[in-house]
Image (cartoon, rainbow, N blue to C red):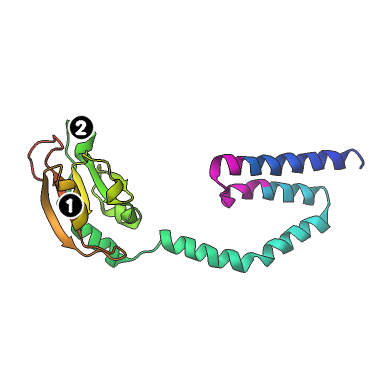
């Protein structure tokens, strides 16, 4: 018994400290990455018959369960919500104007630039073969833009069109959860030919 306790303590210290070090160094404290080592330590405690500690850990987790449930709902709602109107509005903005170009001279010819806010469910309606690039704010968007297709607000269109020729494909679309009307534009300087999709 005296030999197994130090080994077990060393195991828990290595298991949990390595997990914490990796979280801080690589994942910027993403709690989800630490669940597997915690469960492994709990399993070892149960196998070593340290039931009081194991029950204490389980009780502590149950105490935080309501907080977890509400936090998870907020997390999930922001990423996984089937708002069909939202998806339909983005689809009407992009389709049928954006199309995959076979044998394109550049990969940029099959790329759509969108605001970062649209990078969720709406990307599911983007045609097959079209890559998606994102920008956080229009002021931080490096010019000239290389993508063939661009989703921009009126302010974004004004900024980009000062330096590049943009062809209006679809404008003035109201998209839920986005503060400004959006338009779809074709970058005439993308060197992909003059064909219309």
Specify few, some or many for label 1: CA neighbours under 10 Å numbering under 14, 14-19, or 20 or more.
Answer: many
| Residue 57 is at least partly visible in this image | yes
**What residue appears at the point 16 percent right and 52 percent down from the top-left corner?**
158
Residue 25 lies in the magenta stretch:
yes
User: Is residue 149 found left or right of 122 in the rendered image?
Assistant: left
Q: Quadrant of residue 141?
A: top left
Whichever of callouts 1 and 2 sits on the residue coming sooner in the sequence is: 2
Relative to 100, residue 65 above or below: below
Q: Which residue is mark 1?
A: 157
- With respect to residue 37, does 54 lie above or below? below
The residue beneath circle 2 is 106
- Between 156 and 186, the residue placed more toward the observer is 156
Q: In the displayed structure, does residue 120 sit left or right of residue 128? A: right
Instruction: Characterize the local packing of mark 2: few (<14), some (14-19) or many (20 or more) Cα atoms within 10 angstroms.
Output: some
Image coordinates of residue 134 in percent, x first then y, are 31, 47
In depth, the one of 71 and 163 nearer the eye is: 163
Residue at x 58%, y 47% (from the top left corner) = 33
Task: Name which quarter of the figure residue 88 lies in.
Answer: bottom left
For numbered disc 1, what is the local secondary structure?
Answer: helix
Queried whether the magenta region covers residue 83, the answer comes back as no
What's the distance in space between the residues labelled 1 and 2, CA to CA?
A: 23 Å
Residue 153 seen in this snapshot: no
The image position of residue 38, as x and y in percent, is 68, 49
Which residue is nearer to you in this view: 99 or 187?
A: 187
Q: Where does the magenta region start and end? A: 22-37
Residue 37 position, x and y percent, is 66, 46
Q: Compared to 99, does 177 lie above or below?
A: below
Residue at x 59% of width, y 63% of height:
68
- Nearer to us of marks 1 and 2 is 1
């Amino acid at each position: 018994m005296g030999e197994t306790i130090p080994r077990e303590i060393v195991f828990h210290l290595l298991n949990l400290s390595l997990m914490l070090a990796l979280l801080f160094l690589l994942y910027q404290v993403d709690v989800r990455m630490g669940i597997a080592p915690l469960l492994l330590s709990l399993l070892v405690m149960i196998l070593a018959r340290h039931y009081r500690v194991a029950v204490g850990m389980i009780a502590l987790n149950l105490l935080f369960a309501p907080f977890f449930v509400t936090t998870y709902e907020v997390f999930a709602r922001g990423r996984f919500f089937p708002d069909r109107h939202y998806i339909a509005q983005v689809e009407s903005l992009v389709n049928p104007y954006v199309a995959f170009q076979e044998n394109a001279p550049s990969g940029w010819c099959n790329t759509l630039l969108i605001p970062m806010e649209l990078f969720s469910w709406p990307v599911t309606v983007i045609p097959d073969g079209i890559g998606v690039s994102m920008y956080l704010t229009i002021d931080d968007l490096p010019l000239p833009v290389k993508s063939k297709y661009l989703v921009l607000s009126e302010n974004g269109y004004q900024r980009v069109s000062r330096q590049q020729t943009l062809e209006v494909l679809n404008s003035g679309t109201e998209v839920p959860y986005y503060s400004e009307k959006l338009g779809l534009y074709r970058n005439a300087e993308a060197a992909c030919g003059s064909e219309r999709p």
